[in-house]
Image (tube, rainbow, N blue to C red):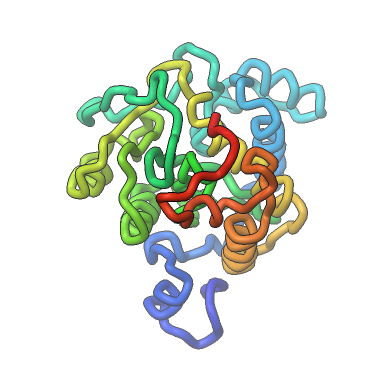
Protein backbone atom coordinates (compact mmCIF):
# COMPACT_ATOMS: atom_id res chain seq x y z
CA UNK A 1 0.00 0.00 0.00
CA UNK A 2 1.40 3.38 -0.99
CA UNK A 3 1.82 6.23 1.47
CA UNK A 4 2.74 8.88 -1.08
CA UNK A 5 -0.46 10.51 -2.19
CA UNK A 6 -4.17 10.92 -1.41
CA UNK A 7 -5.96 7.66 -0.59
CA UNK A 8 -7.59 5.94 -3.54
CA UNK A 9 -5.60 7.63 -6.32
CA UNK A 10 -3.87 5.45 -8.93
CA UNK A 11 -0.10 5.16 -8.76
CA UNK A 12 0.35 7.12 -12.00
CA UNK A 13 -1.83 9.98 -10.72
CA UNK A 14 0.06 10.10 -7.44
CA UNK A 15 3.34 10.23 -9.34
CA UNK A 16 2.14 13.07 -11.57
CA UNK A 17 0.75 15.07 -8.66
CA UNK A 18 3.97 14.83 -6.67
CA UNK A 19 6.35 14.92 -9.66
CA UNK A 20 7.89 11.65 -8.52
CA UNK A 21 9.44 8.76 -10.40
CA UNK A 22 7.17 5.72 -10.39
CA UNK A 23 10.17 3.41 -10.09
CA UNK A 24 10.90 4.78 -6.62
CA UNK A 25 7.34 5.01 -5.30
CA UNK A 26 7.03 1.71 -3.54
CA UNK A 27 8.04 2.20 0.04
CA UNK A 28 9.37 -0.99 1.65
CA UNK A 29 6.70 -2.61 3.87
CA UNK A 30 9.49 -4.09 6.01
CA UNK A 31 12.02 -1.44 6.89
CA UNK A 32 15.77 -1.89 7.20
CA UNK A 33 17.40 -3.05 10.38
CA UNK A 34 17.09 -0.34 13.09
CA UNK A 35 20.80 -0.48 13.82
CA UNK A 36 21.60 0.10 10.14
CA UNK A 37 19.25 3.08 10.11
CA UNK A 38 20.86 4.49 13.27
CA UNK A 39 24.39 4.11 11.93
CA UNK A 40 23.53 5.63 8.55
CA UNK A 41 21.75 8.55 10.20
CA UNK A 42 24.82 9.17 12.37
CA UNK A 43 27.13 8.92 9.33
CA UNK A 44 24.94 11.53 7.64
CA UNK A 45 25.26 13.88 10.63
CA UNK A 46 29.03 13.48 10.87
CA UNK A 47 29.56 13.81 7.12
CA UNK A 48 27.35 16.89 6.89
CA UNK A 49 29.54 18.59 9.50
CA UNK A 50 32.84 17.14 8.27
CA UNK A 51 32.69 16.24 4.55
CA UNK A 52 36.45 15.68 4.56
CA UNK A 53 36.04 12.62 6.80
CA UNK A 54 36.77 9.36 5.07
CA UNK A 55 35.85 5.86 6.20
CA UNK A 56 38.68 5.62 8.77
CA UNK A 57 37.64 8.73 10.69
CA UNK A 58 33.96 7.92 10.37
CA UNK A 59 34.59 4.44 11.77
CA UNK A 60 36.58 5.86 14.68
CA UNK A 61 33.87 8.42 15.47
CA UNK A 62 31.09 5.83 15.26
CA UNK A 63 32.97 3.57 17.66
CA UNK A 64 33.37 6.47 20.08
CA UNK A 65 29.61 6.97 19.81
CA UNK A 66 29.07 3.36 20.87
CA UNK A 67 28.33 1.71 17.52
CA UNK A 68 29.99 -1.64 16.94
CA UNK A 69 31.17 -1.19 13.36
CA UNK A 70 34.25 -1.98 11.35
CA UNK A 71 35.66 0.02 8.46
CA UNK A 72 34.39 -2.42 5.84
CA UNK A 73 30.83 -1.95 7.05
CA UNK A 74 31.20 1.82 7.14
CA UNK A 75 32.56 1.81 3.58
CA UNK A 76 29.56 -0.25 2.45
CA UNK A 77 27.15 2.16 4.11
CA UNK A 78 28.95 5.12 2.53
CA UNK A 79 28.54 3.53 -0.90
CA UNK A 80 24.87 2.90 -0.14
CA UNK A 81 24.50 6.57 0.82
CA UNK A 82 26.42 7.88 -2.17
CA UNK A 83 29.05 9.70 -0.11
CA UNK A 84 32.84 9.74 0.19
CA UNK A 85 35.49 11.91 1.83
CA UNK A 86 36.60 14.93 -0.20
CA UNK A 87 40.30 14.47 0.49
CA UNK A 88 42.34 13.35 -2.55
CA UNK A 89 42.65 9.61 -2.74
CA UNK A 90 40.91 6.47 -3.90
CA UNK A 91 37.53 7.22 -2.34
CA UNK A 92 36.41 9.88 -4.80
CA UNK A 93 33.32 9.34 -6.92
CA UNK A 94 33.89 6.60 -9.45
CA UNK A 95 32.63 6.87 -13.03
CA UNK A 96 31.34 3.85 -14.89
CA UNK A 97 34.32 2.38 -16.80
CA UNK A 98 32.46 2.70 -20.12
CA UNK A 99 31.27 6.29 -19.55
CA UNK A 100 33.01 9.39 -20.83
CA UNK A 101 34.49 11.74 -18.24
CA UNK A 102 34.41 15.43 -19.14
CA UNK A 103 37.14 17.94 -18.22
CA UNK A 104 36.92 20.36 -15.33
CA UNK A 105 36.08 23.80 -16.78
CA UNK A 106 35.94 26.02 -13.70
CA UNK A 107 39.58 26.62 -12.82
CA UNK A 108 39.92 30.33 -12.17
CA UNK A 109 36.26 30.94 -13.04
CA UNK A 110 33.54 32.28 -10.79
CA UNK A 111 29.84 32.53 -11.53
CA UNK A 112 29.20 36.06 -12.81
CA UNK A 113 25.52 36.03 -13.78
CA UNK A 114 22.41 33.85 -13.43
CA UNK A 115 22.67 30.56 -15.35
CA UNK A 116 26.41 30.95 -15.84
CA UNK A 117 27.28 27.89 -13.71
CA UNK A 118 24.98 25.24 -12.28
CA UNK A 119 25.99 22.44 -9.94
CA UNK A 120 24.25 19.12 -9.32
CA UNK A 121 24.69 16.68 -6.47
CA UNK A 122 22.92 13.91 -4.54
CA UNK A 123 22.54 13.58 -0.78
CA UNK A 124 21.02 11.24 1.81
CA UNK A 125 17.75 12.27 3.50
CA UNK A 126 16.83 10.39 6.63
CA UNK A 127 13.37 9.14 7.56
CA UNK A 128 12.33 7.81 10.95
CA UNK A 129 12.76 4.20 9.86
CA UNK A 130 14.70 4.53 6.61
CA UNK A 131 15.97 7.04 4.11
CA UNK A 132 15.54 8.69 0.73
CA UNK A 133 17.92 10.32 -1.74
CA UNK A 134 17.70 13.95 -2.81
CA UNK A 135 19.19 15.40 -5.99
CA UNK A 136 19.31 19.16 -6.43
CA UNK A 137 20.51 21.55 -9.11
CA UNK A 138 21.70 24.93 -7.85
CA UNK A 139 22.62 28.10 -9.70
CA UNK A 140 26.01 29.10 -8.30
CA UNK A 141 25.56 32.82 -8.88
CA UNK A 142 22.25 33.19 -7.05
CA UNK A 143 22.23 30.03 -4.85
CA UNK A 144 18.78 29.40 -6.35
CA UNK A 145 17.65 25.76 -6.33
CA UNK A 146 16.50 25.33 -9.92
CA UNK A 147 15.11 21.81 -9.54
CA UNK A 148 15.15 18.89 -7.12
CA UNK A 149 13.86 15.34 -6.91
CA UNK A 150 13.49 12.57 -4.33
CA UNK A 151 13.91 8.83 -4.78
CA UNK A 152 13.99 5.78 -2.55
CA UNK A 153 16.92 4.38 -4.54
CA UNK A 154 20.11 5.69 -6.10
CA UNK A 155 19.05 4.53 -9.55
CA UNK A 156 19.43 6.98 -12.44
CA UNK A 157 15.82 8.03 -13.28
CA UNK A 158 15.37 10.61 -10.52
CA UNK A 159 18.54 12.42 -11.63
CA UNK A 160 17.28 12.50 -15.22
CA UNK A 161 13.91 13.83 -14.09
CA UNK A 162 15.53 16.69 -12.14
CA UNK A 163 17.85 17.57 -15.04
CA UNK A 164 15.00 17.68 -17.53
CA UNK A 165 12.86 19.80 -15.22
CA UNK A 166 15.69 22.27 -14.63
CA UNK A 167 16.23 22.72 -18.36
CA UNK A 168 12.58 23.73 -18.82
CA UNK A 169 13.31 26.70 -16.54
CA UNK A 170 16.63 27.90 -18.00
CA UNK A 171 19.79 26.66 -19.72
CA UNK A 172 23.16 27.26 -18.05
CA UNK A 173 26.44 27.94 -19.80
CA UNK A 174 28.33 25.39 -17.66
CA UNK A 175 26.91 22.46 -15.68
CA UNK A 176 29.26 21.02 -13.04
CA UNK A 177 29.14 17.70 -11.21
CA UNK A 178 31.41 15.05 -9.77
CA UNK A 179 32.45 12.02 -11.82
CA UNK A 180 29.87 9.66 -10.32
CA UNK A 181 28.22 7.11 -12.56
CA UNK A 182 24.96 9.09 -12.58
CA UNK A 183 26.68 12.12 -14.08
CA UNK A 184 28.86 10.26 -16.59
CA UNK A 185 25.91 8.24 -17.88
CA UNK A 186 25.19 8.95 -21.57
CA UNK A 187 21.49 9.16 -20.71
CA UNK A 188 22.31 12.11 -18.47
CA UNK A 189 25.02 13.82 -20.54
CA UNK A 190 22.93 13.56 -23.73
CA UNK A 191 20.24 15.68 -22.07
CA UNK A 192 22.78 18.43 -21.41
CA UNK A 193 24.51 18.17 -24.78
CA UNK A 194 21.17 18.48 -26.57
CA UNK A 195 20.90 21.95 -25.01
CA UNK A 196 24.51 22.85 -25.93
CA UNK A 197 25.48 22.96 -22.24
CA UNK A 198 29.20 22.77 -21.44
CA UNK A 199 29.71 19.81 -19.11
CA UNK A 200 32.27 20.19 -16.32
CA UNK A 201 33.31 17.44 -13.93
CA UNK A 202 35.33 17.71 -10.73
CA UNK A 203 38.57 15.78 -10.78
CA UNK A 204 40.13 13.97 -7.84
CA UNK A 205 40.25 16.11 -4.73
CA UNK A 206 38.12 18.87 -6.29
CA UNK A 207 34.84 18.17 -4.48
CA UNK A 208 35.18 21.43 -2.55
CA UNK A 209 34.60 23.27 -5.82
CA UNK A 210 30.97 22.25 -5.38
CA UNK A 211 30.92 24.18 -2.09
CA UNK A 212 27.61 25.91 -2.86
CA UNK A 213 25.83 22.56 -2.98
CA UNK A 214 27.60 21.40 0.20
CA UNK A 215 26.32 24.53 1.94
CA UNK A 216 22.84 23.84 0.58
CA UNK A 217 22.89 20.35 2.10
CA UNK A 218 23.85 21.76 5.48
CA UNK A 219 21.00 24.26 5.31
CA UNK A 220 18.46 21.66 4.20
CA UNK A 221 19.41 19.24 6.95
CA UNK A 222 19.97 21.57 9.91
CA UNK A 223 17.13 23.96 9.10
CA UNK A 224 14.61 21.31 8.07
CA UNK A 225 15.31 17.56 7.89
CA UNK A 226 16.87 17.16 11.35
CA UNK A 227 13.99 19.10 12.89
CA UNK A 228 11.18 17.00 11.46
CA UNK A 229 11.65 13.22 11.93
CA UNK A 230 9.63 12.32 8.84
CA UNK A 231 8.04 8.88 8.96
CA UNK A 232 7.22 8.43 5.26
CA UNK A 233 8.28 9.66 1.81
CA UNK A 234 5.08 11.64 1.30
CA UNK A 235 5.72 13.67 4.45
CA UNK A 236 9.33 14.29 3.46
CA UNK A 237 8.34 15.36 -0.04
CA UNK A 238 5.76 17.83 1.17
CA UNK A 239 8.07 19.21 3.84
CA UNK A 240 10.96 19.65 1.42
CA UNK A 241 8.68 21.30 -1.13
CA UNK A 242 7.76 23.92 1.47
CA UNK A 243 11.40 24.30 2.53
CA UNK A 244 12.74 24.86 -0.98
CA UNK A 245 10.08 27.47 -1.64
CA UNK A 246 11.18 29.21 1.56
CA UNK A 247 14.87 28.76 0.66
CA UNK A 248 14.47 30.34 -2.79
CA UNK A 249 11.85 32.98 -2.11
CA UNK A 250 12.18 34.05 1.53
CA UNK A 251 15.42 32.93 3.19
CA UNK A 252 17.88 35.82 3.45
CA UNK A 253 21.46 34.81 2.59
CA UNK A 254 24.34 36.64 4.19
CA UNK A 255 26.52 35.97 1.14
CA UNK A 256 23.88 37.67 -1.02
CA UNK A 257 23.78 40.82 1.10
CA UNK A 258 20.77 39.52 3.07
CA UNK A 259 18.63 39.13 -0.03
CA UNK A 260 16.99 36.02 -1.46
CA UNK A 261 18.24 33.65 -4.16
CA UNK A 262 15.16 34.40 -6.27
CA UNK A 263 15.99 38.12 -6.35
CA UNK A 264 19.34 37.24 -7.92
CA UNK A 265 18.20 34.41 -10.17
CA UNK A 266 15.39 36.45 -11.74
CA UNK A 267 17.19 39.78 -11.75
CA UNK A 268 17.10 42.09 -14.74
CA UNK A 269 20.26 41.29 -16.76
CA UNK A 270 20.96 45.02 -17.00
CA UNK A 271 20.99 45.40 -13.21
CA UNK A 272 23.78 44.42 -10.87
CA UNK A 273 23.68 43.44 -7.21
CA UNK A 274 26.49 44.65 -4.98
CA UNK A 275 28.97 42.11 -3.69
CA UNK A 276 30.88 39.24 -5.22
CA UNK A 277 30.22 35.54 -5.83
CA UNK A 278 32.97 33.40 -4.38
x and y percent of residue 162 in the render?
39, 55
Question: 266 or 118, which lies in front?
Answer: 266
Name the residue at the top extreme.
89
Vertical order, 205 against 15 (above or below): above
Quadrant in the picture for residue 41? top right
| Image quarter hosting the C terminus | top right
Q: Is residue 31 left or right of residue 223?
A: left
How many numbered callouts? Answer: 0
Question: Residue 103: x, y in percent?
Answer: 28, 23
Residue appearing at x 20%, y 29% in the figure: 98
Residue in the picture at 18% in, 48% down: 194
Q: Is residue 237 visible?
A: yes
Using the rendered image of the protein, determine whether residue 36 is visible from the camera's viewpoint: no
Whole-percent x and y of residue 46?
70, 31
Tell which of 111 and 22 is nearer to you: 111
| Residue found at the very far front of the displayed protein | 270
* Left or right: 65, with 18 as reference point: right
Residue pictured at 73% horizontal, 45% vertical: 222
Left or right of 23 on screen, residue 49: right
Residue name at image x 43 percent, y 68 percent: 19
| Residue 276, horizontal then vertical, whole percent | 56, 33
Outermost residue toward the bottom?
8
Amino acid sequence: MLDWGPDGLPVTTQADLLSLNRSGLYYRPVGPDPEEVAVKHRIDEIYTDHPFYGSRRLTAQLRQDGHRVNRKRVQRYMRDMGIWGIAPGPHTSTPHPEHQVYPYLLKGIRAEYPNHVWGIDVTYIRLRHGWLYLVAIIDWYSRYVVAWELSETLELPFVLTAAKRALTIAVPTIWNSDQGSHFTSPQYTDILLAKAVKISMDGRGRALDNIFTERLWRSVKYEHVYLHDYAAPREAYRGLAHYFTFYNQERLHQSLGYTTPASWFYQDPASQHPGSQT
